[in-house]
Structures are given as structure tokens and as C-alpha cells.
Amino acid sequence: MISNAKMQMRDREFALISGLLAISAVLMYLFPSFAVENSAGQIDWITLPLVAFPLIAGTVLMAFASMQPYRLKDRIGQPIKLISLAFALMMLGISSGLLFGWLESINWDLSQYNRYELDFEYAWIQSIGVSWHVGLDGLSFSMVWLTTVLIPIVMITTWEEKIGWYHHPLILMMGGALIGVFVALDFFMFFVFWEMTLIPMFFLILKWGGDDRRYAAQKFFIYTFTGSVVMLLGIITLYFLQPSSQALVDQGVLTGRTFDMTQMAIGAQAAANADIAWLGIDMQKALFLMFLLGFLVKLPAVPFHTWLPDAHVQAPTAGSMLLAGVMLKMGGYGLFRVCATLFPEALLEYQWLLLTIGMVSLVYGSFVCLGQTNLKRLVAFSSVSHMGIILLGIATMEPLGFAGAIFMMFAHGIISPLLFAVAGAFKHHYHTLEIGSMRGMAKHSPWLATFMMFGWMASLGLPLLAGFVAEITVLIAFWKAFGWWVILPGITLIVTAAYYLWSMQKTIFEGGDDGEMPESLGGAPAPDISLWEVSGMMLLAMLTVLFGVLPWIFFDMMTGYAYGLFDGILLNVITGGA
Amino acid sequence: MVSAIDYALWIPVLPIVAFPIILFLGNVFKGMPAWRGRWKEGGTIATIVIGTCLGLSIWLIVGYIGQVTGNESVGQIGDWLSFHMVENGNLVSYSLGFGMYLDHVSVMLLFVASFLCFLIAIFSLGYMNSDPVNLDRNHRFYAEFLLFCAGMLGMVLADNFLWLFIFWEIMGLCSYLLIGFYYERPSASYAAKKAFLTTRVGDIFLLIGLLILWNLFGSLDFSVVWAEDNIAAVDAGTLKIALFMMFVGAVGKSAQFPLHVWLPDAMEGPTPVSALIHAATMVNAGLYLVARMFPFFASPAMAGEFTDLAMLIAWIGGITAFMAALIAFVQMDIKKVLAYSTMSQLAYIFTGLGAALWFANTGHEEIALLAFGASMFHLFNHAMAKGMLFMASGSVIHEMHHVHHEVAHHDSGESAAGNAAGGDHDGGQGGGDDHDHFDAQDMSNMGGLASKMPITATAMAVGSASIIGIPLIGGFWSKEGIIGAAWKASLTSGGAWMLGPALLLLITAGMTGFYMSRMWFMTFAGKPNTPVANGVVEQTPFIPIPLITLTVVTLGGIVFAGFEFVHWVADGHAEMHFTHVLSGIGSEMKHAFLPSGEENGALIFLVTMLTIVISTIVGPATAMALYGGRLQKGEKAKPWLAWLVSLSSRVRRNNHFDNSIWANSGLADSLHQRLHFDAWYDAAMLKIVVPFANACAWFDQHIIDGAIKGIEYGSQEGSSVIRRLTTGSGRDYIMMVALGTLAIFVLIWGVA
Amino acid sequence: MTEITRVQLFSEGGDTWLALAPEMTLLSGLVLLFIVPNLGDAKWRIPLTQVRIPVLFGGRRFTATSDPRLPAMLAIATLLLALWQALISQGADAKTWLLTSGSGAEANILLRVDAFSRIFEIMFYSALLLAAVASIDRLPARRAGSEIQQLIDNRRQVDFYLLLLMTAFGMSIVTMSMDLFVLFIGLEIATLSIYVLVAFHKETPEGAEGGVKYFIVGAVSSAVALYGISLLYLWNGNLQLMSNSATGQIGLVERWAEMESLLGLPLIAFCFVLVGFAFKVSAVPFHFAAPDAYSGASSTVAGILATASKAMGFIGLIRVLVMLAAPADGSAVWMFGLGVIAVVTMTWGNVAALSSSNPKRMLAYSSIAHAGYMLAALAALGAWAWGGESDLISSAPTDAGQWILTALIFHLVVLVAFKLGAFLVLALLETEGEVSDTAPLAGLARRDPIIAVSMFIFMLSLAGVPPLAGFMSKFLLIGGVVKMSAGDAFAAIAAGDGWSLGQMHWTFWLALSVFLNSALSLFYYLRIGVIMFFEVPIEGRRKPLIKAWFLRLSIWVCAIGTVIFGVWSDHLINLCYNAALAVL
Amino acid sequence: MIDPMWAVVLGICLFTIGLWGAVTRKNAIIVLMCIEIILNAVNLNFVAAAAQHGDVTGWVYTVFAIAIAAAEVAIGLAIFLSFYGHNETISLDEMELLKH
């Protein structure tokens, strides 16, 4: 036993650290009132705390916790969770402040090609032209908000599920890295954060995952890494295809080039205005494919999807929620941010490819779902299937399709965490994921059953829930672009309903008056989900309804983004190229 | 001035908002005495809410009929989604909005829906809360019930096809939830799934239809798509495809052939649900949708383009009507009879609409409106009658059940399906799954209830009469119109194909007379077949209220007819003739019994009379001959029923014949099997889709992931091979250095 | 371009001492290491008298000088001083010196002190300094025990640090040499010392066996290389790399460039020379002895082998390939061969490491793979002036060449941080007993989270995961390759003409193979992480690790360096770029 | 005077012999000897080339090369000895401890 005095000392230490963190957080939060503003009258560095705070706080918390003696680690778990949650809420506060205009009144609905709000640039690795260049537009802001809202929800949902003191800090770090991806306007930075997201997730899976977690975690890491290194090759190639600028050389950039996306976009736009393919159509296509591979693996799209089911099945609830909720969206985000913005000609050329892959993902994914017996695998494959819709939306080459695809990312980002929260709770409480191993969940766990029903229904595209908006918008654009191919998504919608209903029939329903318990429970009574889980799922459900009924909160911003993109470059290409 | 229209939005919103509240309160307060008692587990809230909706609706309707609120669209409330599309190299802005639209059809349906929902809510207070099976989960029922009402009300009020679809889908969800209300029964969960999936198939067609429609018009607003100029501007062929797709959606929702399989199974839900789905709301949605297609057919620009589609609609109706009536012959379950009857009656409306659309498309505007009006009127009549019938059957079942419990001293409530395997979905339902168990829905367990349940028996009789089309009672007015319209169409040039549906309808009219009477007589006439039936009394509170109300409404069909309802509902500009009821009735009578003044007047007259004869006399008489009978000694039915019972016993005594040849025939067998549709669909699912899905899963795991695993495995293997090359012998290493030198020579020399 | 000062070596008034300050420091340190531990009360009796003059050398050693920790301190002080000197000479007023063998017409240019040599000096000294600091704990000096035991210990300590300093000295010469033979001598000084270091743990059979193999293979290849050098001498008449305007001697570079068509003799000679360096960088198939040597030697020494020694090989390759064989036009003859070797090397290394259960062998194979990456970059350098006749290609080749060299130097420098760091972690584990499989790593996170996190950082950095130094270096390497293969594409694009992947030089695909290989390498790097974090410690290795503060200090420095050079690499890149400019 | 080229030819022969021996023999000492033979070939080359070019540095190189060879032998033998101490053999083929 450790002496009382010593424990008090630990507490004091702890209070000190948390106090410091809290004070800095408050300072950061209050800072806008007397902060320096940029020329556009915006506090442009506000994204910095969004990225840096969670990363730093997570690292500090973990370092602090790891230095404590082993026996104390149970005791510090709770405060660490609280601090992490406080940071997550602070991030949510900042991003919501941006959304609702508490911090900055920004009209997110208006968007122009290559113009970003809160544009902030600071030289980072000057010698090779890397800078900390961040900015937000309708596309990235919706993703950032999604991330910030998911992080606290994930924390709340998994509050009691897993013991450990670095679970929540890891989630916090994950959030920082993800936001970094979404705000980055510099390819180097983009890639750094892109890869950085892997590490917390790797640990989440490895530490709290299922029986086969080692395999799954490594597969996840290596598979996505492989995809992204090809993308990195594309980034570097793109970099060296830029003209060297004397001005940059004078600033100390040895190569005279930058990784700045906005600079490249200027070039791309100029080329499109002059009706020539930027970089030459062959090069553009090659680069497009390199980037595409990275994004497709992340998305994931068939046939690069097999890491996903393994990762999901093994990942803990929090891991799955974040993985499905935000990480997959990185792929879609990249498609817009890079492929659509910089390679419009190639995008047009490879419309068929996106269509094919999207369609295969969608249809094939749903049929694979129908053949699954593991709840999490089923949900994972349903993600694959839904991500196909994003590709279809892009393939339509319509602003509506784009906006719909982005909304799909957003909606799926809210719905799929709910699905995985349910699946995770299922695993947590029943120690199995086999569909049909238990029946009559409505009896034992009415809350869980309710949320399962809700989530499943939301995922199969029930109107007034967020997923429907995405589906209907993409499909409208799809019909315009491809006509009768819409039959295939149509069939998929039926199959989707089939597998979801089937899985519900075998879990929520049936089982007679007393229900059937899985063998894995060993005859023990199955408790309903905890209050934490209920709160988390409830929040997600409420968001799902909110954005199903009032989609325009974000849809207008996405429409604006798509409009800007088409107005700025794509329209030129479509009309000129065709 | 406070206008009803200002509050109209609350009609669908109120129940939607109440839905989560009841669910939440129910989950929290579950089991508390006050919640069970005063709050009726949410029933009180539900009734108040739906009552408010009814009040608002009536306010709206009264205002509308009195021209207070204006005639047509209430207009857009706002943009829901706004977006851009590329059109001819430009970005064009579009939006999908939401708003409300009122016209005669929607007003009529609004009344039907809110009125019936309210009555059913009251009915449920009695039915649901007094059944111990439902204890502690009634809040679920009420919540979902409210959502369902919201779906229907919203759908009716929506001013565009998108929101129509949205609420349409919400109803689909609710039907799923409510059919699966007794989740612990495998049959219920199976039925729920089946209902959702089957309607989903239709829904996808509808969705695609809407996509095409949007693409044609750039909007889904009624006001835009119905505008004559807009219709004239689009390609007729594409529009036809869109309309066809939408029609398939309607087929799914209204349970028409070939997507009809879900409806009988849907009887797994509690009886109020059956009343709700099969009478008041959901099945009407499909009809409403088809009715909403009328302006396309009526557009002069499209004249003659859609005749085949109209014909198809009529044929689907005809086939379904006949088929459902046929299957209804052999059903022993009181609710299933009603279910098939619903299917059949809806099919009537479909045929009527088909004829109306056909006429509209071929330029016979006047008669088209007449047919359309008749169909809508039949919808109204059928909704009222069927709602009542279901509630009456619910009353019977409930009391039977209750008594059974008392008799059997069985307290644990309707128990689980027990050993009934998931595969055995056919036939059995409710308590019928368990073979040792008493089936409160089986008509063979009933009999002679006319004296024990007078209100119910009366309601049942009136409802059946309306469905059969006994002259002067509700459904008669509209059914005559439909059959007449179909025949007229078949006699008009180019409409020869309509003869099929017309004939089918005519035959079905007689069959309706038979199976509805059969149901009534089996239940209420004769002697009680079981001790349970002997002990039944009407005792549950709340149940009689809706029954009596609806009896009055159904009997009052003649008044509505006198209002020239048919004209009013069909013609957007007509007004109700409140002042000339009597003369209205007179002219309607003349129309119904002595149609003339048109070409082929004689034939139409013949058909009319034939309909009346076979449905009113032949059908019921046959049923009496088979199933009639005197009540138990000492029992006495109410005077307005007594004559019917004694008539039946007399007919039976004199004309009873042995129908066992028919009953044991292969036809009856396949009718029991519902003409094997379910089996085929199941087989298609199990033999094609599921194996294909499994093959996909296998492919994914072994081929796609197998490739990855292969790379993994291959590298591991390669690794050990390569490592084995490092033998450890220093001599080999030197050898490799020498070889390497050679290799460098070759490589460099080769290039040089 | 900085001014070049010609200085006659050891001439009066010359800047020899200034130019060679670090080396002189090392030499003094070497001498001190000889002398100081031997100081004792030895007296010399003047013959025929009883007068004993204390000579202080030999006899009974003083307590202070016989302290077994003294050699380490001396060596560390020497290396620190040398490092400091090398660092300060990197300032704005950095000078370039050419050190010649004489003043007259006969004088050969022997050494050249410039940014290139300085950065490598810094790199070598840092590596050896870290190794020296780490060895304090790894080669524990016991103060207790009998006097003779102390003496023996002291001797061993002296030997070890002497060899370390000798290695540093040899390596310094390699970085500076402008004469192929001088380069070879430097190489041999360093290599011979390293042979002994590898076999230093002669008590264990592994140590001896590793030493034998490394020695025998190394000796064969260096003999072959020397033979090649002698042939070059035969061809050119001198081994000067640069032409000497003062003497009129034509250096190898110019002579090679003058060649009308390729001659057999220099080409054969060139191939032979390559063999020697290929062994040093452990390119396939000259790498076979490397894993054995790594696993036989103590981890600190293996770390030196993988970093400093390898860098030395690369300096040789750079000198030979870039200066000797840089074609005036067209692609270098060695480009294709080197490309093939590079791809084979990296693939071999990674694939072999996949199933390797001995962490030291695994790191050895990983080091081979890294050599492959760098060789790929060097191979791309051969694309020097591809398509030289085209008008499109103008400034790009030199730029690209400088870029590749920058990346290469950067990679070699930061490799010290994470490769050596990884070996040092193993060294820490070796203090508890042999590390011949992954079991000792199991549950390291639980025993010592900071060390485990450091190790994981090293692993990720080796794999090239951002934002660590390993990512940065690989990023730059590929950048160089791509820049080289893209040539003047940007000009074409700016002019409005398109470009296509087919127009890229084929070395572009080397870049892809590097990336795919680094993805492959994740397999085994991650496995280490998994083992450290999620396996239960084995029996006997449950308690927290020993304190070993010096070793830990080295590890921390490495870990911090790995992160810093990934995130704030700006300054280092500039340094490397200057170094590259000095070469090209 | 003999044409220096003959010395070079002799050097080639020695080199070939040395390399062949190094590759084929398994006794470490013989391999070491073979290496010495290669180094002698080097020396011959240097000497001959110096004569050819009239450049004295070649002879300086030779001296250095001899020194290096000597150092190498010394170190090599020391390492062999310690290996022998453990294994009682110096056969290059019987090194089994470190492999794969």
C-alpha cells in the first residue's frame, strides 16, 4: 500500500497539471477577444489549437500517466478521462463557435474555388518549401466539425467500457491528427497528419481489440500505409512538376517550390481557363491514379477494402467509431481536396473508373454484407458499401452529386459511429458478435435494441434521418448522369434493407418470452447498456435526426463548396473537354 | 385573422414530436402505477395528440370547403435542400422544398386519416391496455402509432413528391415496427421483415420514378409538375416510365399483385395496427399516389400516350381483386379474411383509377372525373368500413381472448410461439402458432356471438354490407361507379382490353358478397362452437365508441353521396352540395340504378343490375346456405340483426349443400398456400439471393483478402528462403563476393 | 562559392591545425589514451647510481590514472571536443581548405576540408560519441576487485576506446580525402579498427565468429578494391580525384570525362573499386557477413557498423561514382547496374528481415534495406544528364544531383539518430543477458515505458512514418530521385506542353520500389512494437531495467533527435545542402 | 628494362590465384594468405605503374599497401586465434553459430 501522504502528493501533482492545462485552455479560449486578426479580419490561427491542443494534451497526459507507478494507474484513470473530455469539449466549442458565429462570423455557404477561410500560413521547413498552411472551406469545415463532435461522443460512449489510462488521451490525439488532415493546405502537412492518424488507431486496436487484434492492427497499419506511400510518390512528383520560383529561392527555399495546395490550384485553374490540361493530360492521369490509390485504400473501396472488416471486428468500440466515423472520410475528403481540385481533366477521364469502383463497392459490398454472420463485419462491409456512394457521387460530375457525396461522408460519419457503438456494446455485454447467437434483445436490453434499430434504420437510408438526404441527392445526380444504371444502387438499397432487417430479426426480435442468451455469456444475466453508452448513442441519434430533418445546416455549405469547385474549374473542364 | 392553415404544419409535426417523448417517458416510467393507470402507458398522450390533430384537420377542412383557406396549394414553406446542376455548360440553381398542398383529394384523405387515427387511438385505449400481454410495452405501441399517423398525415399534406416519399417511408418503418410489435414471436418478426422488404421493393421503384420525374421537370413540386406547360415540354416516353415506376411503388404499398404477399402476414401486429394499416392509412397511400398521377394522364399534351399504363393499372387491380377474394374464401382467421378483403377492395379502387386514368388519357374528361370520384369515394367508404370491421374483429378477438383466459385460468398472457419454428410462417399467426393453444382469431371457435356482442355484431354487419355493396349503404355508391366505369371503358373504342378487369370486378363483387357474409355468419350466427365463445360479453371500455361512430358514418354514406361527393372530390373546382342533399340523393339513385342516356346504356344497366344481384343476393345467400344458423336457445339478437340470423338459418335449412368437394380440392389447397406466391418468393430469396451473397462473402474472404494473405504468406516464405541462403559459412560469403564482382561486371559491361 | 585556401600540409604558418583541428584533437586524444592510463610511479635508475628519476610511465599505476572509467572519459572528452570543433567550423565564415602534400609542382592534393567533410565529421563523431557514452554502461568498468583485475579492466577499456577513436580518425580521413589512395588508407584505418571492435567480445563464441566472417569477407573485398585502385593508377598515373592546376596533373575525374569511348581498363578497375565500397555499405550480394557481424558484435558496435561505417562506404561511393564516373553527357554506365543492385538490396533486406526473430539480425537486414534505398538514390544520380541533347534539359541535372546528395547526406546523418538508437536500446537489454530473439523485448512497455516508446519511435522512423526523421530522409531521397527523373518537366509544363509518366526517366520507378519496400518493412518494424507493448515479459526479465544512465542518455538523445530532425529539419537540410554543393 | 606491363600481367595472375584461393579454400589462414597474394598483385601494379608513369607516388603507395597488409594479417590472425580458442578449428565452413 502506498502511504496516504504520498497519495496526496500525487493528487496535488495531478491537480497542478490539470490546472495548468485548464488555464491554458481557458486562455486560448479567451484569446480571440484580444487576438490579432489577419487582413481579412479573422483570427486565422484559431485552427492551431484545434490541431495542436489535442496532440499536445494527449502526449502530456500519456507521458504523465506513464511515469506514475503501476499501482496508481487505476486511480489516475478517471481524472485523465475527465481532462481529455474537457479538451474534446473545448475543441467542440471552438468548431461550433466557428459554425454559429460565436468566434467568427463566417458565411460558410459562400465558397469560391481555392479561397479558404481562416487562411493561415507560417513557414515550417523553409528549405524544402513546407509551410504550416491551414484553411477551411465548406468541405473541410464540415469534416472538422464532425470530428470535433465525434471525439467527445466517443469518449462518453466508451467511458466505462475499457479500463486504462491512455485510452482517452489516444482518442484525443486521434482527433488532433484528423483535424490536421482536414485543415491542411500543404501537401507535406497533409501527408504528415494523414499518416499520424494511424498511430493512435494502431494502439487503440492493439491495446483494447479483440482476440486477433495483433493481426488486425498490423494489417490496418501496413495496408493503409502502402496505399498512402503511393500517394506520397504522387505528392513528390507533383511537387517537382511545379515551376521553380526565384522569389521562393530568395526566401531560402532551396528547391524554389512549395507544397502549397493553393499555389498548385492557381496553376491548375489557370491551365483550365486556358483550356489546356494542367501538367499534360497523361501526367495528370498518372498523378490522379497515384492519389486515387491512397484515397481508395482509405475509403475503402473494393478491392482495397479487406483491411477494414478485420480492423473493425478487432477494434474496440472507440476505435471502430472513429475509424468508421472520420478516418474513412479522409479518403473521400482527399478525393475532393486533391483529385477534384487539382486534376479535373483526369477526373473527367476517369469518371468511368470511379463509377465502376463505386458501383462495385456499393453492390458487391452489400451482397457481402448479406453473407456475413458477424455483426461487426456486417457493419464494416456496410461501410464499404456506403462509401461506394461517395464515389458514385463524384463520378456524376454534378455539383449536386458532389454535395451529396460530401453529405454522405458527413451523414455516414454520424451514423456509422452509432452502428459501431451498438455493435461494440453488443460485444461488450454479450461477449459475442455472432448474429443469431442471441434473440430477443428487445427484452434484455431495450435501450440497446432501440439504438440498434435506430442505427440500422438510419443506415439503410430511412427518410428524415441523415443518410437519406445523402442518398437521395446522390441518386438524383446519378440519374442525370448515368440514367438506368440507377437500377444497381436501387437493388443495393433493397439488399441493404434485407441484411439489416435480417440481422435485426435474429437479434432484437424472436426468442420467445425470455429471449435467448448467447453461450458466451455462460448463463450470466445480460445487463442493459450503461448510462454512458446510452448518452453517447442518444447524442448520435439526435444528431442523425437533426441532420436528417434540417440537412441544410451543412448541406448548404456543401452545395456552396461544390458550386465553387465547379464555378472555379470543373465547369471549364467539362464544357471545354467535352 | 387566425387561419387554420397557420397551424396546419402542426398536424404532422405534433405526433412526430410526441413520438420520442412517449418512448422516452415509457422507458423511464415503465411499470409505475400512475403510468399504467392514468397515463395508460402513453395512450392518454397519444389520444390527446391525435385528437388535436383531428381538430386541426377539421378546422382546416371546414375552412377549405368553405373557401376560407383558398383553393389549392398552400405553397412552399421553405427550401430543404438547395443545390446546383450543370445544364448546358452553366450552373443552374435548384432546390427541393417542403410545403403543404391542399386539394379535394388531400382534404378527403386528411379527414379519413385523422378521423380514423383518432378513433383507433380510442379503441386502443381499451384494446391494448386491458391485455396483460402488452403490459409495460404499450408506450412503444402508442409512440409508433403516433409516428405512423404523422407519416400518413404528412404524406397527405405534402406539396411535393419528395416529401410524399419521405412520409411514405416513415409509414413503412412504422408498419415494420408495429407488425413486429410482439417481437418475441418469430412469426411476427418474420412478417415485419417481409412487410418492410416487400414494400421496400416498391419504394425503390417509386424512388427511381421520382428521380426520373425530377430530371424531367427539375422539381418535384405538385404545382410545377402538374403545370400544363411543363408537362407539354417533356418526353412522353420517359414520363411514362417514371409513372410506371411510381405505380410499382403504389403496388407495393397497397399490397397489389405481385407485391401483395406482405399484407396477410401483417396481421401479426395487434389489431389496432391492422385497423390502422389496412384501413385508415398505409394502404391508402398507394392509392393516393396513383390519384396524384391523374394530372399527367389528363394533360392534353399526353393524350393517348399512357393508355397502356392505365390499362396495366386496371389489370393489376382486376387480378388482385379476384385473387384476393378467392383466397379469402378459405381463410378461417377472422383478421385474414379482412386482410384479403382489403386487398380486394383496394384492387377495386385501382381498377377504378385505372379506368379513370384511361378515360382521362383518351380525352373523355367528364367520365374520367366520374370514375376518379367513384374511386376516391370508394377509398373513403372502404376506409371507414374496414376500419370499423377491423376494430369489430378486434373486439371479438379481445373478448374471446379474455374469456379464454378466465376459462383456462391462464394468467401468463398470450405466451410465446414456443416451438413454432421460424420456417413455419404460413397460416398460423397470433396464438395460432401454438397448436395446444386456443386461437382467439379462428372463426371456427366462434359462432353465435350476435346476441352476446350486439354492438360489435351490428358494426360488423354494417361494415360488411358496405364492403359487399348492399344498396344504399356506403360502399354501394362507389362500387357501382367503379364497375360501371370499367365496363364503360371496355365499351369505348380502344378500351377492349378493359373488358378483363371489368369482368373480374364483376365476378369479384359476387365473391365479396360471399366471403364477407361467410365471415359474419361464421362469427355471429349459429351456435357457439366453443365454451369460450359461449361466455363472451362486451365489457372492455372504449371499444364501443369507435364502433358506434363508424357505424353511423358508414350508414351515412348515402348522405355523402347526396353531397355529390364523387363530383366534388374529382373536380377541383366543384363544391359540396350541402343544401341539396335530397335532390342529390335522388340523382345519385338514378345514376346507380338506372344509368341511361349514354351509349351502350342498356349494357351498362345490365351490368349494374347484375352487380347488385350477385353481390347482394347470390353471394350472401351462398354464404347463408353454408354457414348460417340459428342462435343458441334463449339467446336473442337485437332486432336489426335478428332477422338476418333467422334468414340465414332458413336459407341454410333449405339450401344447404355439401361443399367438401371444393373445400378439399387442389384449388382450395393452393388457396390455403396463398397460390404459392410466398413460397416462390422465399425460394427466390433462399435459392438465389442468399447463395449469391454467400458466394460473395466467400469470394471476398478467400479471393480478395486471400490475395492479400497470399502476399503476406508469400513474403514470409520468401523470407525464410532468402534467409536460408545465408548459410553461415564464411566460404560461401566469399563466394558471393566473387559472384557479386562478376555481377557488377556483367551489369556495367552490359550497359557499356 | 566559398573561397578555397590551398595549404601545404604541416607547413609553417599554414592553416593545417585550423583545418584539421578535429583530427588533431582525435590524434591527441589517441596519444593521451596511450599515455594516461600507463602513468605510474615507474622510475628510471640512472645507471651506476641509485638515483631514480621518476619517468611516470609504467610501474605501479597511480590510483587516479588506473581508474577503469578514465579511458571512457578521455575518449568522450576527445570526441566532444572534436565534435565541437567540427560544429563551430560550420558557421557563416566556413572555409574550404585544400591540403596538399607539398608546395611545389610535385604536390598532390591530399585532403579537402569543406562543408561535405565537416558534416560527415559531425555525423561520425556524434555516432561514436553516442556509442562511447553508451559503452560506459555496456562495457562496465568494475572499480572493485583486485588490483590486477582493475588493471585488466582498465586495459580493456583503453583498447575499446582507442579503437573507437581510431575509427573516428580513419573516417575523418575518408571524408576529406581527395586522393583515392588516401581515401583507401582512411578506410582501412577505420575498417581494421572495426574488425577488432566486432570481435571485441572474444569471450563469447558468437563474437569471435562474427569477427572472423566480417574480417575475412571485408579483407577480400578491400583487397579487390585496392587492386582496382592500383589499376586506376596504372591507367591515369595518379590517383588524384581533381585535376591539379598547379601541377598540371589530370585528375581521374577529368581523365574519365575526356575518354572518347569507354576503355576497358578503367572500367574494370572501376568495377573492382565498387566491390570494396559495396561491401562497406553491405549491398547485396556483399552483405552476407553483415548480419552475422551485427549479431556477433555488441549492440553498440553493431550500431556503429550500421551508421558510421556505412556512411563511410557511401562517402566512397559518392566520391567514386559522382566524381569519377559522372558522364558529361548521357547516363552513367553504372546507372543500370546500380539500380538493379539497389532494388535487389532493398528487397532482399526487407524480405529477409520479415521472418527474422533475432532483433539484431532484423536490424541488420533493415540496415541492408536502407542501403538499398540510398543506392537507389545514387543510381538515379546516374541519370545525371539524361536526354542531354534535348533543349528541355537545362539546369535540372545539377540541381537534381545536388538534391539527391543532400538527401543522401541527410539520410546518413539522421540514420545515426534512429538506427543507432535502436541498437542502443538492444544494448540496454543486453545488460541483462543475451538478446538473440524477440523475447527480451516482450513487455518492455510495462517495464520501462520511456525506453519502449523510444524504441517504437525508432522503429517507425526506420519504416518512414511521418513526422519522424526517417520519414523526412526518405521523403528527401525520393524527392531527389523524382526530381532527377522529372528533369525539366516543369519547364515543359510551364511552357504549356504536357508531360507524361512515360517521359519520366526510368529511375522514377526506383522511387516507387523504395516506397513499396518501406511499406513491406512495416511488417517487422511494427512487430517489434507489438511485442514491446502487448506481450507479457518473459521469466527473468520482469523487473524494471537497470538504471544505466549513460546508456539511457544516449537513447534519449537519439529519440529526441529522431523527432527533432523530423519536425524541425530545416537547419540540417541547409547544412546537407551546403555539403552537397561542395561536392557538385 | 623489362616492360612494366609484364609486371602487370604477373599481377593479374597473382590476383586471379589469390581470388581463386580465397573463394575455394576453407582454411581461414590460407584464405588470409590468398588475400596477401592479391595485395602483392596490387603492389606489383603500383610499382609497375610508377615506373610506367615515372611517378614516385606509386612506390609510396606500395609502402603503405605493405603496411596495411601487415596490419591486416596481424589483426586477422588475432581474430582467428580467438575463434580457434572457442572452436578449435579455423575452417570457414564450420561456422554454424551465426546464420540465417
Image (tube, coloured by chain):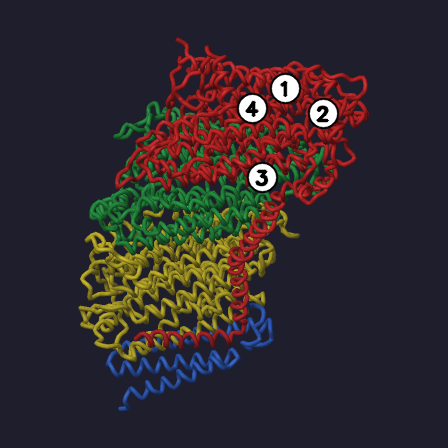
Q: Position of residue A550 (x, y in %)?
A: 43, 27
Query: Which chain comes out red in the rendered image?
Result: B
The numbered mark at residue A501 is 3
Labels 3 and 1 share a subunit: no
Between residues A559 and C495, which one lies in front from this camera angle? A559
Q: Colour of chain C?
A: yellow
User: What element does badge 1 sit on?
Assistant: helix
Mark pair 4, 3: CA separation: 38 Å
- Tag 3: amino acid: Leu
Q: Hey, what amino acid is under mark 2?
A: Ser
Distance between mark 4 and mark 2 Cα atoms: 22 Å
The residue carrying mark 2 is B648
Q: Nearer the viewer, residue B474 or B201?
A: B474
Q: Judge whether residue B302 can be spotted in this image.
A: yes
- Label 2: how many Cα within 10 Å (few below 14, some 14–19, many 20+): many
Chain identifier, green in the render: A
Colour of chain D as rendered:
blue
Q: Amino acid at mark 1?
A: Phe
Disc nearer the start of the sequence (1/4)? 1
Tell me the quarter of the picture where residue A69 sits.
Answer: top right
Query: Mark 2 to mark 3: distance in Å?
Result: 47 Å
Q: Which residue is depicted at the point 54% across and 20% down?
A: B18
- Quick check: can you spot residue C448? no
